[in-house]
Amino acid sequence: MKRVTNYFEPLSHATSQHVGYSFQMTPIRRDVTIDNSLGLHARPAMQFVDLANQFRSAVTVYKDGPEPVTVDGKSVMQMITLEAVQGTPLRIEAEGDDAELAVEQLAKLVADKFGEEE
Amino acid sequence: MEIIKGIGVSPGVVICPAIVLDAEDLVIPRRTIDASAVEVEVVRLNDAVTKAEEELEALRATLVASHGKEIASIFDFHSGLLRDKALMKQIVGEIRTQLSNAEFAVSVCMRKLAGMFAKMKDVYLAERVKDVYDIERRVLHNLIGEKRESLGHLKQNVVVIAHDLLPSQTAALDKGRVKGFACDVGGRTSHTAIVARAMGIPAVVGLGNITNAVSGGDLVIIDGTRGMVIVDPDPDQLVEHEEYVRQHVRLEAELASIAHLPAQTIDGHAVSLMANIEFPGEIDEAFARGATGIGLYRTEFLYMASDVEPTEEDHYNAYREAVQRSQGKPLVIRTLDLGADKYVYGKTQVKEANPFLGDRSIRMCLHNLPMFKNQLRAILRASVEGDIRIMFPMITTVMELRQARMVLNDVMEELEDEGVPFKRDLPVGMMVEVPSAALMANSFAREVNFFSIGTNDLIQYTLAVDRTNEKVAGLFTPAHPAVLMLIRDVIRAANRQGIGISVCGEMAGEPLYTLLLLGMGLNMFSMNGPDVPEVKKIIRSTTTEHARQVARKVLSFDSERQVMHYLREETRKIIPEAF
């Protein structure tokens, strides 16, 4: 297993919006690293988005760096603009009743290098 | 009337109405709509997008059926964008807040997206800008209500005018109706040129701005032989070219009549005329033209059609189809020859200062063994179904050849261990396309079963000329005596050692050089399918002795101009209408 460096500060805004609900849902987060050789190009991005769209939860993806980017994990257009080449650390966050499962499966897709062959 | 000069990349003349592809420059007028009309525009947008999705799905289905799923997967990303809610939200937002008409909203948002893609550092992603344009066009055409010219089902014969033809566009063409191509950009080795030659229709590229000069429906003459396009011709020109077309048709008919006669000289010396192909689907057409085998199956398309590396099964399916279509006739499969002039596949994005002298072709394969082995395994597995021969490109040193053969042996052992059947004695050959290999042909001849001379690269490396650079392209010619001497020596070395020898570069399909090559002792020519009949006609009209005399005389010249002048004269005696 490759150790994933945590580049991210804790995100405070994500929970604050929901204070006041009786069943406050905490977003589920997972830090991953794009490991497949081609990076997040069209086909992997499509795979990610197709999977994300199978869940009810909102899916958000963050990229840190000099210009941090936050995108909708259900939009292929936005995912592509991450320009996540091999080695890019990303944070996947989901919020909703199936958030746990969503994050788990999306992280697995990334870890499995989108099924790309070695 | 307007005459535009370009580069003729596929011969012949055609007069037809035009359809113009590529609407990147479509100017969409901004119309401010009434606030009450917003919902109507949103509905129009949704309808247009839904329809675009259906069109893509249909196109995809036909492509899967005709070309397999790799090519069809080109459209996955297109569908993905259409289904993208964030993108649609942007467009709807543009309609609602700016009170724009749907066309304008689509255009604004897609241009913005295209701009973002174009700026990306990753070369592969920046290339996706074409997909964005493609989607924009598709949705706009549906909105404007103008029937999108469906290239798959044309009602009349047309010529296609485009900025540059994309593989996805040519794959969808109605091959029976498209009679010619004319493009703004491109060169002799561009995709358009290769497809046009394979289809046997005229094509002119490098025309600059033909897409602006022609509107859909204009009558256009495409003269691929002389490299020009006439838009909206005068009556005189029409008459002149119609006569030209008739002549050409007569010649074609005459050539077709000899398609199934053997390629042998008057004194009974037989040679093989083979075809060069890119897709297994071209094999039937090549055989119909009289080819007696496939002398060069380029496998690069397998790598270029998809974003990811083809799997062993992808390779195997293609080779199996090819070998079955070949019906026991020879099928020479060239291993991956990517790099430099061709599309650089995802992985290698390290910029090389001199790509033509860099990590390409067999060099790249030997640096990417798993990828190379996938291809070799697939070729070997398919070998049990016919006469498959394997050929390594761009061999420069003996060690390289030995390494490639070693990898091949490893793969054979693996297959044997797994109990997978293959033909152990399949012939192994190499391309002679680097001067070092040509000069050492005697040594190489002891280690392979056949040579194939790739004249395009051999000329480029011998004369130090990049023929895509128009300032020096004039220096590129097979007629240079240095090139001819190398070719003569390679043929001689092969014949002395008793191994197979062919020429598979463009020179083999140019009637101008047929007598010369024949006279040098060449007995296998591999060319684009449509060139076979003309070359055959020359061979059937001469004798070995005459060809030898021509070769001797040519090799005594010391300038390419003398060589060409003399060859033109000699050839004209046989096919007067050829030049």
Image: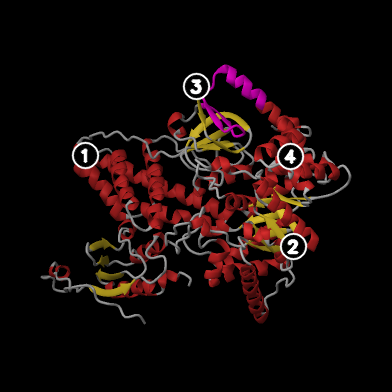
Q: Which residue is mark 4?
A: B534
Name the disc covering residue B1, or none.
3
Where is residue A76? Give x, y as percent: 34, 58
Label 3: few (<14), some or many (≥20) within 10 Å? few
Sequence order check: which comes first, mark 3 or mark 4?
Answer: 3
Is residue A79 found inside the magenta-colored segment of the image? no
Q: Please report contact status of discs 4 and 1: CB closer than 8 Å, yes or no.
A: no
What is the chain letter for disc 2?
B
Residue B323 visible in the picture: yes
Question: Is B414 above or below relative to B14?
Answer: below
Label 1 vs label 3, nearer the camera: 3
Sequence order check: which comes first, mark 2 or mark 3?
Answer: 3
In space, the residues marked 2 and 1 are separated at their CA atoms by 66 Å
Is residue B241 found inside the magenta-colored segment of the image? yes
Q: Which residue is mark 1?
A: B99
Name the disc covering residue B387, or none.
2
Question: Is B361 above or below relative to B531?
Answer: below
What is the chain letter for disc 4?
B
Segment colored magenta: B219-244
